[in-house]
């Protein structure tokens, strides 16, 4: 069996075309671009380190209010005196429950009965052994801001 020159050339051209097509097929498909990154103006407030909690008037003297900032942080703001606001990480230092709130001048945890001072966050009765974590809170105008 002999292969003539014409068949050989046709085969070479076909093979070259296949290589070219294969090269085209290997190019990546166009990819949709993602939108530009958020600007500073678009950034959520928690990224700035300050969090608007709400009107200070919502918290009566001797009481407290919880603010869920995100899945990892709930803040309890207490008002032990007319012009005094305190803020704490509401996660109980005993076993991680979110404290219930302020009751009878104590921050109460409903899980196992720990009690904390609403002015300092110090343990008043166990089983918790460590105070609640303090968080800075400021009154600006009529609103409360947490500095996280
Ligand atoms: S988690 Fe609060 S007392 Fe146990």
Image (cartoon, helix red, strand yellow):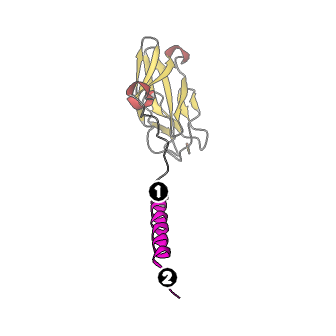
Give the residue at the far bottom of this rendering: 1
Kindly identify which residue carries mark 2.
Answer: 3
Nearest to N terminus: mark 1 or mark 2: 2
Give residue 24's mark: 1
Q: Which quadrant is home to the C terminus? A: top left
How dense is the environment of label 1, judged by Cα within 10 Å: few (below 14), some, or many (20 and up)? few
Q: Which range is magenta? A: 1-23
Residue 27: where, in percent of width, then height? 45, 55
Which one is in front in this view, the residue at disc 1 or the one at disc 2?
2
Q: Nearer the viewer, residue 53 or 101?
A: 53
The total of numbered circles placed on residues is 2
At 46% from the left and 45% from the top, the residue drawn is 129
Mark 1 and mark 2 in contact? Answer it, CB < 8 Å.
Answer: no
Say whether mark 1 is within 8 Å of ligand 1.
no
Residue 52 seen in the figure: yes
At 45% from the left and 33% from the top, the residue drawn is 121
- Relative vertical location of residue 47 with respect to residue 126 in this rendering, above or below: above
Residue 23: where, in percent of width, then height? 45, 60
Give residue 110's mark: none
Is 124 covered by the magenta stretch?
Answer: no
Q: Which quadrant of the figure has residue 103? A: top right
Is 2 covered by the magenta stretch?
Answer: yes
Residue 108: where, in percent of width, then height? 56, 34
At 49% from the left and 65% from the top, the residue drawn is 18
Q: Nearer the viewer, residue 119 or 55?
A: 55
- The CA span between labels 1 and 2 is 30 Å
Q: Which quadrant of the figure has residue 114? A: top right
Give the secondary structure at mark 1.
helix
Q: Nearer the viewer, residue 71 or 139?
A: 71
Residue 148 seen in the figure: no
Quadrant where ligand 1 appears: top right
């Amino acid at each position: 069996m002999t292969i003539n020159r014409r068949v050989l050339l046709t085969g070479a051209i076909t093979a070259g075309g296949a290589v070219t097509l294969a090269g085209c097929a290997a190019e990546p498909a166009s990819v949709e671009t993602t939108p530009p990154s958020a600007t500073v103006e678009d950034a959520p407030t928690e990224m700035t380190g300050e969090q608007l909690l709400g009107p200070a008037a919502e918290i009566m003297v001797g009481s407290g209010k919880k603010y869920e900032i995100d899945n990892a942080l709930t803040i309890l703001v207490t008002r032990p005196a007319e012009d005094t606001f305190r803020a704490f990480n509401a996660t109980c230092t005993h076993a991680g429950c979110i404290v219930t709130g302020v009751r009878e001048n104590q921050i109460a945890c409903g899980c196992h009965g720990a009690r904390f001072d609403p002015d300092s966050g110090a343990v008043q009765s166990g089983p918790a052994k460590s105070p609640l974590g303090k968080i800075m809170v400021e009154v600006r105008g009529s609103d409360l801001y947490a500095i996280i």
